[in-house]
Amino acid sequence: MSLVFALAGNQNSGKTTLFNQLTGSNQHVGNFPGVTVDKKEGVIRDHHAGEHHRGLRSWGHPRHKRADIPAPAPALVVDLPGIYSLSPYTSEEIVTRDFILNEKPDGIINIVDATNIERNLYLTLQLIELNIPMVVALNMMDEMRANGSTVDVNRLEEELGVAVVPISAAKNEGVDELIEHALRAAEHKDYPKRQDFCTGAVHRCIHGIAHMIEDHAQAAGVPPYFAASKLVEGDAPMQRRLKLTDNELDLIGHSVKEMEDELGTDREAALADMRYTFIEKLCAETVVKNGESREHARSVAIDKVLTDKYAAIPVFLGIMLLIFWLTFGLIGAYLSDLLSLGIDIVTGWVDAGLTAWGVNPVVHSLVIDGAFAGVGSMLGFLPTIVTLFFFLSLLEDSGYMARVAFVMDKLLRKIGLSGRSFVPMLIGFGCSVPAIMATRTLSSDRDRKMTMLLVPFCSCSAKLPIYAVFTAAFFPQHGALVMMGLYVMGIAVGIVWALLLKNTMYKGNPVPFVMELPNYRIPSPKSVALLVWDKAKDFITRAFTIIFVVTIIVWFLQSFDTRLNVVTDSSASLLAGLGRLLTPLFAPLGFTDWRMVTALIAGFSAKEMVVSTLAVLTGANTATLPVTLPALFSSTLAAFSFLTFTLLYTPCVAAISAVKAEMRSGRAAVGVALMQCAIAWVCALAVYQVGSLIL
Amino acid sequence: MTLDKLPLGQQARITVVGGEGALRRHFLDMGLTPGTAVMVRKIAPMGDPIELHLRGYELTLRLEDAARIEVEPQGAEVEA
């Protein structure tokens, strides 16, 4: 049996950086059952190999002799979500505490930001109550040292009753010692030496209740002291877990009431106050801060511009424009070209090889037109995803994303979201796939799902060629206006949809917008690289599985007729047949020609396919399409209705598979796709019918 | 006075933490407990939310939420 450690800590405490240092690239991302919260696991690296101690001893922490160290056992570390408390109000906090209570890890590694120690220790005190061998990793000690600030680590250890190891996750200092201490604590079962940090009335109340519920707690596998302190806080999930009788609940209520009366405050404030009072006293005794830290002063100075009343929004838009230009214009486009050049070359070789070999033409078409064309076009997304996530992780890890949320919050609040959702939505105008993947950074499950549902209303760049062809054919005088109108319509429908969601499906209380603005920090290259690699791997896996299957299906529909003969005339294909079959459904929208419907179905695999399918079916090429297109449409209004439908209907299969991955439910993804089609149908119907009345 | 009315840069102490449910717990968990010293550092460009300085770090709150917290100004008054 290998040891299992839980890594817990506040957001912005350097937890991901430490996780990466502990495990290297030895990571595996999974999920907690039932919630869209990440669970990353990794094997702790062999800390004896290439061990360096970079002057950490000078921080005055006594180290045990090397001779005591047992041979390293393989150990696993689970990276828990960044949280501030163990209250039952966010899915992240519930996941963390359920993981620790149910999985009973052998040890907890609690990362604490030494530069923000008061608020970080608040979680530490609650973790200690869980009564599991624990080590505190006191992070950012390099910054403390550089600022001439000190922490009396021995004293801190004594008062907390758990080992404290000073580290710098970013500089990989002290991490080996941390691993040694964690292994030691877990192997020797060094339980925290104290759990009781309270005094007076709170102390009496928790102790009384802990005594009373001890049997229930043991039966439920919860440490009695933790259970008692949660009951004093009025924690409903804990009441249910312990299966308390009404009589016991009454007694608890009475005891709490007594405490509240004595303190003149309520139960929740009493406990929070007790913890913070203990921490304030502890910090006063152990931490010497040498004035304001350089990092804090620097952050305040940077914020003079980045969150300035006048400069903030222009600077933010400038940064996003630059990222878009670099991603979709410069770097991304260059990489895309390079990649498609590579794919073309390989396709050419295979094509020539198959021809030379004289392979059956159907198999030839399957390989070249189906597999290679399909996966090739999907891999075309990859450079965009890699480049975009490179920039996004810079924004996130530097601390700027929190500022964006601060600046943009007011805009999104009315639709029931917070400023945090702004960046994913903005990315949606470039490409829905990375936008949906970017919702991962949102701090609440509800916000994440709602943002994913709204991203498709931000018209993605792959729809631009469709708009361009249609405006050239039908609105040559008002091209820009129609284009603008479409974007505005997308946003407007999105807002209406969001209001609907807010008042129906997501009526539940949003997670309050009480957010930390961390100090700006230079992102760790390792973390950025790992995130980009993660996202790329994620997408490649999907490109070769679900997306691959869908493109093969589309190829099949395009290549065969109902008798499974290979078609020579594309209007005889199964796809065309499907288009004809569905045409009556679209007649009320003004789509009377089966070719329009067929193009829309083809657009499911990628939006560019709408234009190319229309071109093939009308015997034109992309350049002559504006000339042949008007023959399909009975009126300009029908063309506009078609544009409306294209704007709003389900995004491509790559985006749907991203929804499936992020929502961790195939059914939800299909539901989302159908819902988008329904919305598009209703809106196009409204455009066409209302338009017919007016015109 | 309530926290949303506190002038920029004015030091104050929290007297009462209101609100309920998740919001109140977030206040308390993030260190907004009675007796804590706070200062409003900044107001977002669109007038809401606000940025607070407390316990050596920066926290942002929406005005309507900040209105649930009672504070008592400390030291020299800052001109609003």
Image (tube, rainbow, N blue to C red):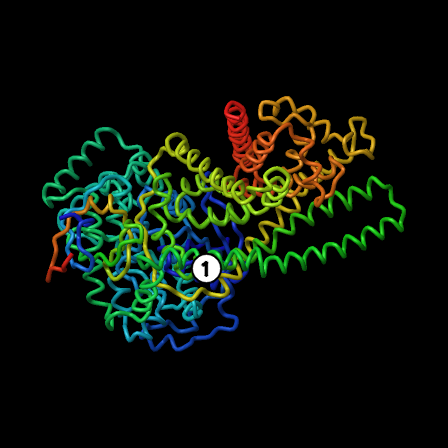
Where is residue A571, by image quadrant?
A: top right
Mark 1 neighbour class, 10 Å CA radius: few under 14, some 14 to 19, many 20 or more: many
x and y percentages locating residue A548 in the rendered image: 68, 43
Q: Residue at x 72, y 58 (%)?
A: A342
Chain letter of mark 1 equals A
Q: Can residue A207 be seen in this view?
A: no
- Horizontally, residue B31 falls left or right of residue A621, namely left
Residue A298 in the image: above or below residue A89: below
User: A285 or A608: nearer the eye?
Assistant: A608
Q: How many marks?
A: 1
Q: Which amino acid does label 1 sit on?
A: Phe
| Image point (72%, 43%), residue name | A624
User: x, y percentage for residue A150?
Assistant: 27, 72
Q: Is residue A165 left or right of residue B39?
A: right
Residue A338: % across, % down? 67, 60
Furthest-front residue in this view: A477
Q: In front: A412, or A223? A: A412
- A691 sits to left or right of A64: right
Front-lying residue, A435 or A126? A435
Residue sitting at 27 percent across and 57 percent down? Answer: A119
Residue A118 in the image, given as x and y percentages of width and height: 26, 60
Q: Name the residue under label 1.
A: A19
- The answer to which quarter of the image holds residue A612 is top right
Secondary structure under tag 1 reads helix
Q: Considering depth in this image, is A535 or B44 the residue closer to the camera? A: B44
Above or below, comparing residue A476 to residue A158 in the picture? above
Q: Residue at x 51, y 56 (%)?
A: A42
Q: Is residue B79 visible in the rendered structure shown here?
A: yes
Q: In which quarter of the image is residue A295?
A: bottom left
